[in-house]
């Protein structure tokens, strides 16, 4: 074995992902919101009425997984799923009043989280990090095809 486990970039990225997930999970616990559910909510706070397919594409999850998350968010009273008028097979997700008010509490937490993660980086470094992560993502996507 040429590399030790600590030398694999994929392990380093995985460990960072675990740390980020654990941090945001602890911040969202009081709001009955899992980190993956928060991704759906963040998209709806950004633009209400997105379809489940649009959300699946944005967060890179399969439609079944998004449908399950949407069902859970609906049971919690945060969203309402409505059949599209244009195509009855398409479900659009809309925030309820509870979901909208939740955003007033959770969006600042997400913004603070992003500031914490980016602390000490220049804009140039953040741009370079984004470029490098995109390159890794592209490499993995090509491998999966």
Image: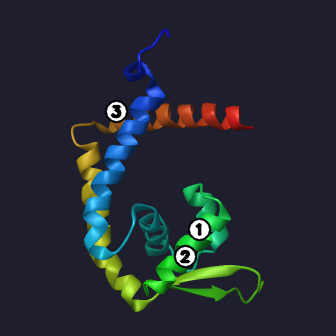
Q: Is disc 1 placed on a helix, strand or loop?
A: helix
Give the CA separation, mark 3 to mark 1.
Answer: 33 Å
- Residue named by callout 2: 70
Does residue 110 lie above or below 45 as drawn? above
Residue at the spot of label 3: 125
Across and down, in percent, residue 120 comes to 21, 37
Please state if 2 lies on the left or on the right of 115 as rendered. Answer: right
Residue beneath the point at 57% across and 37% down? 137
Mark 2 Cα-neighbour bin, 10 Å: few <14, some 14–19, many ≥20: many
Give the residue number, with chain letter if any, for mark 1.
Answer: 66
Q: In the structure shown, which secondary structural element does the residue marked by tag 3 occupy?
A: helix
Q: Which residue is pictured at 35% across the width and 76% down the height?
A: 103
* Residue 115: assigned label: none
Could you say where residue 10 lies in the image, as x and y percent from the top left?
A: 48, 30
Instruction: Give the class, few, some or many, for how many residues have Cα within 10 Å of label 1's Cα (few <14, many ≥20).
Output: many
Using the rendered view, name the quadrant where residue 27 is placed.
bottom left
Between the C-alphas of marks 2 and 3, the distance is: 36 Å
Give above or below for 37 relative to 120.
below
């Amino acid at each position: 074995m040429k590399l030790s486990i600590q030398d694999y970039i994929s392990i380093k990225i995985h460990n960072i992902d675990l740390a980020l997930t654990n941090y945001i999970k602890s911040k969202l616990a009081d709001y009955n919101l899992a980190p993956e559910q928060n991704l759906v909510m963040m998209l709806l706070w950004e633009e209400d009425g997105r379809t489940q397919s649009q959300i699946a594409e944005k967060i890179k999850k399969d439609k079944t997984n998004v449908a399950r998350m949407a069902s859970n968010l609906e049971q919690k009273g945060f969203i309402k799923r409505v059949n599209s008028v244009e195509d009855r097979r398409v479900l659009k997700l809309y925030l309820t009043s509870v979901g909208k008010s939740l955003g007033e509490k959770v969006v600042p937490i997400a913004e603070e989280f992003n500031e914490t993660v980016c602390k000490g980086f220049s804009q140039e470094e953040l741009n370079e990090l984004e470029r490098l992560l995109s390159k890794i993502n592209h490499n993995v996507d090509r491998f999966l095809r």
